Amino acid sequence: MPNYPHFSDYEPITRAKGLRESNADVEEGWAGVQPNSEKSAPPSVGHSSEVRRQNDVDKEPAKSGAKGTTLLPAEKWLAKKGHSITFLGLLLFTFMVFFRPYEWTPSLAWLSSSAFFIALFTLAVFIPAQLGLEGTLTSRPREVNLVLLLLLMAALSVPFATDRLKAWNAFIEYIKVVLMFIVMVNVMRTEKRLKATIFVILIASCVLSIFALRDFEAGNLALRGQRIEGAIGGLFQNPNDLALHLVTTIPITLALLLSSRLIVMKALYAAFLALFVVGIVMTFSRGGFLGLTVAIAVFTWRLPRRNKLLIPILVCPLLIAVVLLAPGGYGSRLSTTNDDSAAARTDELKRSLYIAARHPLLGVGIENYVLYSNFDHATHNAYTQVASETGLAAAVFYILFLITPIKRLRMIAAETGSEPRRPRYFYWAVGLEASLIGYMVSSFFASVAFLWYAYYLVAYSICVRRLYSKERTALTTKLQETSSNRNSTYSLPGIKTDLAV
């Protein structure tokens, strides 16, 4: 794929009233991501002239707002800056959630509520900026609709919960997740913003992996003196949750490594990968190892154009080497499925399925399954967690929320995978698909449905397909202009191009 023009810091998602943009990808159709169909054909030349007229309007001193009115100086500043301030708030919020500095030293304990206030600030900036720019609170890709339906089901479960106070508190926590996800979907709309957010999380993952190795070597084992505990609390205190998180970062890091052209960055990403694998091993998580195996298998299966059957021959020895080089007892734990932990998880799986069948409409209330557990535990399964606590319909919404971005990432990979020199979008799409599938596998052994893990991955996926669609639209416009001047044929990525020279 050739080098495309870079876009400004702000790219509108919804179409302004009275003005029609050619890139209708921002709506549910996501034009430009429909391979092998007439829908993926370039817009007509007449449509291109409409784009040029729109560009002429944008160059006029008095810009038009959502309703065609002249913008005031403050509104012009807002339109120029876009969601820059909101993104800074989002980035700071991500740092606080993933690093939790107030847990590192008592001197920073005053920051314990900082994530909440940063989220409030981010929302306070986001809402007027979003309304001023687009006249709506959020764009509405299918994932946003699904997560709103899931939030609705969680809300409906509260009045009928066994412990209403417990359910209410859990619902308030989940609202924070959903609101920040919506902010990410609308604000994370440039490549720089995407990479900045991912890089913050990769650095946090490196810190977690280093401390996991240090604690294991020092014998600082917390769970019955057998396994390490995450150095950073909250999301990562449980070793299984820590392993799940590291599983999702590995395919993304692989995608960044393969798409980067700088040797220094490739070396940095390779070091990240080594640390993440070590971190997963140090958790002794069986679900984490299974998720890692599936994620790597999916990623490597997508890379070669031919001879895909050679992939298992190459991947299996690597996984065997990881097990052989791991600390003593790691291989034994992976092969053990009848210990007390495995038996308890099997019991919780059966129990949660039974509770879901007994309460199919609204479940027993978000975070209320523990009241029905035989061992006072969570379900240890994200899917039965949603089904038993918020109902079977909510479980369907949750699964669709995870599957929808995967389907569209595969469309991008299909369109770009046949190019002689694969663009960065191919690796990003494959990496995010592998990350989401790795999450889906590992979350079968963890109650993480209402936590942050999947929501960041889905937000990344929406951002990638939006960037890809916009560059594809820009290429379409450029090829249309060239073809109209030279009477040539043209096409898009994934379709042979024959421009006259």
Image (cartoon, rainbow, N blue to C red):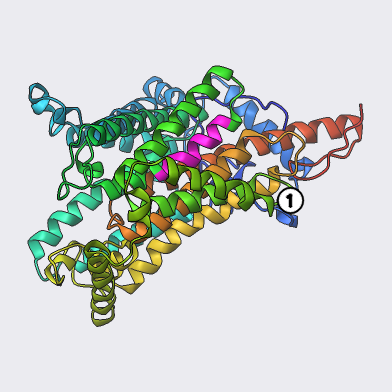
Say few, some or many: other residues with alpha carbon within 10 Å of mark 1 (under 14 / 14 to 19 / 20 or more): few
Q: Residue at x 27, y 75 (%)?
A: 350
- Is 435 above or below relative to 379? above
Q: Is residue 448 left or right of residue 415?
A: left
* Viewport quadrant of the C terminus: top right
Q: Residue 406 location in percent, x, y?
A: 53, 54
Q: Is residue 131 left or right of residue 255?
A: left
Q: Quadrant of residue 474?
A: top right
Q: Residue 33 location in percent, x, y?
A: 64, 49
Residue 465 in view, yes or no: no
Q: Is residue 55 magenta?
A: no
Q: Is residue 396 left or right of residue 62?
A: left
Q: Is residue 114 left or right of residue 239?
A: left
Q: Quadrant of residue 347?
A: bottom left
The residue that label 1 is drawn on is 307
- Check disc 1 and give the amino acid type: Asn
Q: Residue at x 40, y 68 (%)?
A: 396
- Is 323 above or below relative to 486? below
Q: Residue furthest bottom?
A: 358
Secondary structure beneath dot 1 equals loop
Specify the segment rendered in magenta: 247-257
- Is 87 above or below relative to 246? above
Q: Residue 26 location in percent, x, y?
A: 54, 45
**Which secondary structure type mostly characterizes the magenta part of the structure?**
helix
Q: Residue at x 7, y 25 (%)?
A: 106
Q: Residue 218 location in percent, x, y?
A: 21, 32
